[in-house]
Image (spheres, helix red, strand yellow):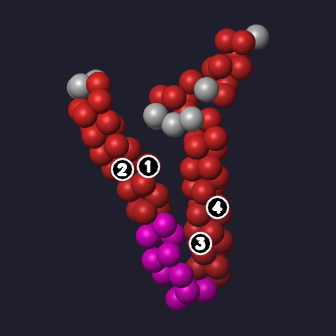
Amino acid sequence: MIRVLNDLFLDHPRSVDEGYFEHQRVALSFSLQLLAAAAACAVHALVPGLFVRTASRAVARLNDRMVVNRRRRSAVEGGAVTGAR
C-alpha cells in the first residue's frame, strides 16, 4: 500500500526535483494557462482574426518553463551540489 501511494504521489515530483505541493502548484498553473489557450483556440476557430498567436505563444512559454528551465535548473543544481548526474 505504501509503495502504491509513493508511486502515485511522490515518485514523479521527485523525478523533476519538486516536492508534492510544489509540483501541484506548478501543474495547476500549467493547466490554467492551457485552459486559457484552449479558449483562445475555440474563439479563433469561430473568428480567425482573433487570438491569431495567443495559443502558440502560450505553448511556447509553457515549453520554455517545462523543458528549458528544468534543464537549466538540473544543470545548476547538479553541477553545483552533487556533480554531474
- Tag 4 secondary structure: helix
Q: Is residue 3 left or right of residue 79?
A: right
> Which residue occupies the extreme front position in the image?
81
Q: In front here: 82 or 6?
A: 82
Q: Mark 4 points at which residue?
A: 32
Indicate which disc residue 66 carries. 1
What kind of residue is marked 4? Leu
Indicate which disc residue 41 carries. 3
Give the label, 1 or 3, closer to the camera. 1
* Above/below status of 52 relative to 8: below
**Labels 2 & 1 near each other (Cβ < 8 A):** yes
| Distance in Å between CA atoms under marks 1 and 3 | 21 Å
What kind of residue is marked 3? Cys
- Based on the displayed image, in which of its 4 quarters is residue 43 positioned? bottom right
Q: Mark 2 points at which residue?
A: 69
Please state the horizontal and vertical placement of residue 78, each as a whole percent of the image: 29, 31
Please state the horizontal and vertical placement of residue 75, each as a whole percent of the image: 27, 38
- Tag 1 secondary structure: helix
What's drawn in magenta, residue-wise?
A: 47-58
Q: In front here: 81 or 14?
A: 81
- How packed mark 3 is, by other alpha carbons closer than 10 Å (few <14, some 14-19, many 20 or more), is many
| Distance in Å between CA atoms under marks 2 and 1 | 6 Å
What kind of residue is marked 2? Asn
Query: Which numbered disc flags the more N-terminal residue, 2 or 3?
Result: 3
- Based on the displayed image, in which of its 4 quarters is residue 36 positioned? bottom right
Give the label, 4 or 3, closer to the camera. 4
- How packed mark 2 is, by other alpha carbons closer than 10 Å (few <14, some 14-19, many 20 or more), is few
Q: Which residue is drawn at 38% across and 56% down?
A: 64
Q: Assess whether residue 52 is covered by the magenta stretch.
A: yes
**Labels 4 & 3 near each other (Cβ < 8 A):** no
